[in-house]
Amino acid sequence: MLALRLARGAHPVVLARRLLVTAASAATGFLLLCALAYALVRPGGEAPAARLAWCLLPVAATVHLALAVARTDPGTRPRPGLSAIGLGPAKLALFAAATTALAALTGSLLALAVFLHLRGDLSGMPFDGAAAELTAAGRPLPLPAALTLLAVVPLAATATVALALRPRREPPATEKDPDAARPAPAEPPAGLPWGVTLVALGLAAETYAAGGAALPGGLGSGRGAVLAGWVIASVGLAVAGPGLTHLSGRLLQIGRPGAARLLAGRALMAEARRIGRPLGVAAAVAAVTLGGTVLFRQEAFRPFGDLTALGATLVVLCAVATLLTAAVESRQERAPTTGTLTDLGAPAALLRTTAALRAGVLLAVFLPLTWLVARLAALPLGS
């Protein structure tokens, strides 16, 4: 009840971000129900399972967006006034999970209503039964199976938010490293070598399978193996995101940097994990989208018809929205530092130059790399 009251009184921008989670949950739920309808019409075989597996990407994208929105929610930030009335970090994490569950559950119920309406089960509105073939209108809908599928996104999003925002116990002062209090450059994320390895492995496997050879380890051959290599390369690009962001911060500080380059580089190094993860995911989605233009020209690589385009569009929009939300979170985290610099008399032009340098170096690093991975991944697919 508290989560519902606080949600109603939230800022319009916060409500808009929660509505994004609701919309993404609704679209994902509709895809899951369409996969169920396909299984009703064509039971057995690998096609229904493949359609259901395709829905895992939109599910993951929606959960990722829900986590990013929960992190930027002002209601989840610990404050002394809330702690005084018993709303400490643990209660705020539960509040964030409850708010996420409410938004995702609303989307799932909306997806069910639209699906039943397009089947013709709900009448009195325009487009009654307009998608009878897609929704298997001639077959009875198993309600337990439909509700189970619709519960996937709310449960996954709620559990992810609760685990990610749970309070972590700090080690005692005697167990801390005595050098921890000393100011240092942030430690680089460990994912860059793994990401580079996955990209190289995926591209090599894709090229090997494109020649008609079977991949070792029983991974198969042909179209499925080519797509598996493509996915591995994209995952590697996402894994390398935090490391590439940290590297971008170091590049800004090469030589004898001025105040703007030094501030921008240190900020990127400190925020490498926060902004690098969604940036890496966005780069991976962009690489898949660019390579997908080659795939969609081939009829054999369009197994799901319109659902392929709907799912791909949903993943792209969720990746973009998650990246923008992470940028908002990063700005909120930098607010105290920005305020201190302003109080010390730092000119506004310095802050604008610092922001432009951060954005510029990230684009200079990620755009060419994303284009290169997409082109290399598309070469075997177009052959």
Image: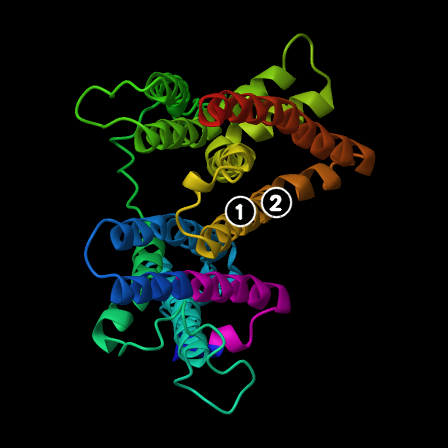
Q: On the picture, is 261 further left or further right than 243?
A: right
Residue at the extreme bottom? 124
Q: Is residue 299 left or right of residue 221?
A: right
- The verdict on residue 253 being magenta is no
Coordinates of residue 320 in the picture (x, y in percent): 57, 46
Query: Which residue has dot 2 on it?
Result: 331
Q: Residue 19 lies in magenta, yes or no?
A: yes
Q: Is residue 179 visible?
A: no
User: Could you tell me which secondary element the residue under label 1 belongs to?
Assistant: helix
- For label 1, the residue is 316
User: Label 2: few (<14), some or many (≥20) within 10 Å?
Assistant: few
Give the image quarter of residue 367: top right
In the image: residue 328, left or right of residue 222 = right
Q: Which residue: 32% across, 62% down?
A: 38
Check disc 1 and give the amino acid type: Val
Write down the region rendered in magenta. Answer: 6-28
Q: Residue at x 41, y 25 (%)?
A: 189
Residue 308 pos. (x, y %):
45, 50
In the image, taking residue 78 as reference, residue 333 lies left or right, namely right
Q: Main secondary structure of the magenta part?
A: helix
Which element is circle 2 on?
A: helix
Q: Nearer the viewer, mark 2 or mark 1?
A: 1
Query: Residue at coordinates 66% horizontally, 21% vertically from top-left?
Result: 262
**Can I make out residue 360 in this image?**
yes
